[in-house]
Amino acid sequence: MTLPSASSLSFPAASSCRLCPRRCGAPRTPQEGRGRCGMPSFPVIARAALHTGEEPCISGTRGSGTVFFSGCPLGCVYCQNGPISHGRYGRAVSPSRLAEIFRELEAQGAHNINLVNPTHFVPAILASLELYRPAVPVVYNSSGYERVETLRLLEGAVDVYLPDLKYADDALAARLSHAADYFAYAGPAILEMARQTGPMALDGEGIARRGTLVRHLLLPGHTRNTIAVLDWLQEHRTDGLWVSLMFQYTPVNPKPPEPALSRRVTLRECRKVWDALLERGLTDGYVQDRRSAAAAYIPDFDLTGVERADASRRTPSVVPDQGAGK
Ligand code: SF4
């Protein structure tokens, strides 16, 4: 497999970033970023460790080798990973260190390398994969707010896509994620992901080797949005998409823009959308137990696995801690 060369991606990006649908055109250097995501071009990471909070075909029995990237181009008001997405807590590392992290996670027994919220670091990730290509699948775990042009750079590098499809309602996307164009981008992005991977393929242990698994989180008070998302997924079933319907919403924002976001989803709401899922024949995938508490899925963002265990081997290219709230 040949990956796009880092040089062909103009990495490290010096100006005019247009990687995601925000298309800020902002300058980004390895140490600094002035765009909507606020991130430099070197990847900023809050944690790199085995994680068992994903779907069974991702977490398996040993855990997913999960790299939590900091910053976010989307910025949802109910984000469950606020300290790293909004707060931007993390540490910037060089692409060579990220390649080492992939190797270390694999050595720990990871079923895959799971890149969480990677959109704004695609060129650096590709540079890292050029340096070290893991033997286990590479999972691209994203908000779904993606440009098809950026996803095409990942063809051949990513084995499994794990995108959200958060909204089919533009007004809701504008209110909760400041992205009225969310669905206009996420729909084509998911079809591009499915084109690249083909239908879901599992190995003998039930771990995804290839495929696209679309996640949707039911928001309290918004069953209609969920049903519209399911309608779209039914329409595109032939693309071999799997679906993960999630009920783990937990209120974390003390001042949400609407009162319903201060509570968890009700049993009645869960039953309504579960019925809708079954009526549409979307039976490939997962439905989450309503009793799942989101807090149980949120790991400590404490820089675990980010730096080398042997600090004396640190490279000078690692830039300083970005720090919470930067
Ligand atoms: S990745 Fe960041 S800097 Fe680049 S276009 Fe998106 S928000 Fe702007």
Image: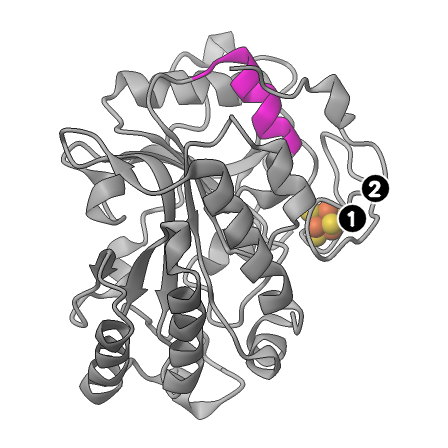
Which amino acid does the dot numbered 1 rest on? Answer: Arg
Which residue is pictured at 31% across the width and 48% down the height? 299
Crowd rating for badge 2 (residues with CA inside 10 Å; few <14, some 14–19, many 20+): some
Query: In this orientation, which residue lies closer to the viewer: 133 or 168?
Result: 168
Q: Position of residue 246 (x, y in %)?
A: 29, 66
The local secondary structure at tag 1 comes to loop
Residue topped by disc 2? 27
Range of residues picked out in magenta: 123-133
Residue 11 in sight: no
Q: Position of residue 92 (x, y in %)?
A: 59, 32
Which amino acid does the dot numbered 2 rest on? Answer: Pro
Name the N-terminal-most of marks 1 and 2.
2
Task: Tell me if residue 265 comes above or below residue 135 in the rendering.
Answer: below
Q: Quick check: is the Cβ at mark 1 less than 8 Å away from ligand 1?
A: yes
- The single residue placed furthest to the front in the displayed view is 238
Tell whether 288 sits left or right of 167: left
